[in-house]
Image (cartoon, helix red, strand yellow):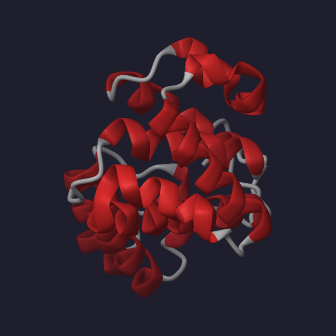
Amino acid sequence: MARIPYADLSAPEAQPLVQRIVAERGSVLHLYQMLMHSPPLAEGWLAFMTKVRQQLVLPGDLRELVIMRIAHLNGAPYEADQHAPIALKEGLAQPQLDALVDWRAAAERFTPLQREVLALCDAMTREVHVDAAVVQAVRERLGERQLVELVGTIASYNMVSRFLEALQIHSDDPR
């Protein structure tokens, strides 16, 4: 159960943003309903995260791989609930998703690139300061643009999971 009530989406001043969220995302998820307590924050979040999710050249399977790993590392079940179906659509296999809790023990389920991406994700999420060799390994495979997009995606979804968990937002919360 969320720590504070979800925002009232029927408020007249909320309607333009609610309609935009529905147009871009299909519905107002729990996350966005909580963000609607601050329309400027919700609007900025929507614009930024839409770019991250839909407008980067970073392959979708890598994006969803790190999102799912972050959900595990940060204990953010809402994030995992929302992204598991997307991860499967982007080409990840269920055995890979199942192995993310301890991916190193099941390293054979992941390609060399995926293992390097997961190592970067783990370092950014757990230690913040990342060894240069970890960054360089990913850079050599993806190039600078996709490296920057990957780092930005990992940072962004760490923000998402921290917001979700601070306010205890869950998929089954009544609204």
**Toward the viewer: 12 or 64?**
64
5 vs 120, nearest the viewer: 120
Q: Is residue 131 left or right of residue 22?
A: right
Residue 93, image x, y percentages = 47, 16
Q: Is residue 34 above or below residue 142?
A: below
Q: Residue at x 64, y 49 (%)?
A: 119
Identify the residue at horizontal 38%, vertical 56% (top origin): 140
Image: 164 above or below 97: below
Residue drawn at point x = 60 percent, y = 59 percent: 134
Quadrant location of residue 174? top right
Left of 35 or right of it: where is 169? Answer: right
- Nearer the observer, 175 or 57: 57
Name the quadrant containing residue 19: bottom left
Give the x, y percent position of residue 114. Answer: 50, 36
Name the image quarter holding residue 144. bottom left
Can you give x and y, in whole percent of width and height, for residue 21 in the image? 30, 59
Residue at left offset 75%, top offset 56%? 2
* Location of residue 72 in the rendering, given as x and y in whole percent from the top left corner: 72, 41
Q: Residue 18: tell me if it is visible.
A: no
Q: Is residue 48 left or right of residue 31?
A: left
Q: Is residue 99 above or below residue 143?
A: above
